[in-house]
Image (spheres, rainbow, N blue to C red):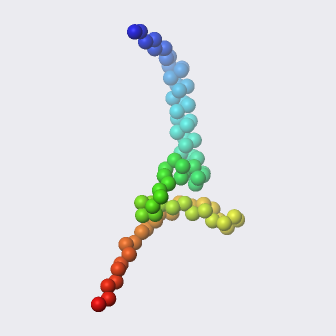
Amino acid sequence: MVTIVPSIDIVDALIVLGGLVSIHVLTLLFTAWSIDFKCFVLYSKVNDIYAADSCKVTPAKFSGSKEVVPLHIRQQQILILE
């Protein structure tokens, strides 16, 4: 079985490298510009609040901007009265 691999010259390699760099830069900029895109790329949804470490806050219309905030979950203290 013979596999034919096309030869890639320097111009083709630079075009591919430029495309990869462009995608990388755009991804970096979109995560800075859009909270929704940042959440899509960097975070995942969980079903249990105790498994989460961050939360996306979406305010009411015309009341501010979206934000990702860290969660600080404290352990509940059970008070036993004797």
Image quarter in which the C terminus is found? bottom left
Extreme-left residue of the structure = 82
Q: Residue 55 location in percent, x, y?
A: 51, 61
Q: Is residue 81 left or right of residue 17?
A: left
What residue do we see at 53% from left, 26% from top?
16
What residue do we see at 54% from left, 49% from top?
40
Extreme-right residue of the structure = 62
Image quarter in which the N terminus is found? top left
Judging depth in this view, the residue of 48 and 40 nearest the camera is 48
Q: Is residue 55 above or below residue 78?
A: above
- Quarter of the image for residue 67 reads bottom right
Q: Residue 34 location in percent, x, y?
A: 60, 52
- Quarter of the image for residue 26 reads top right
Q: Residue 52 location in percent, x, y?
A: 44, 60
Extreme-top residue of the structure = 2
What residue do we see at 51% from left, 29% from top?
17
**Res. 16 visible in picture:** yes
Extreme-front residue of the structure = 82
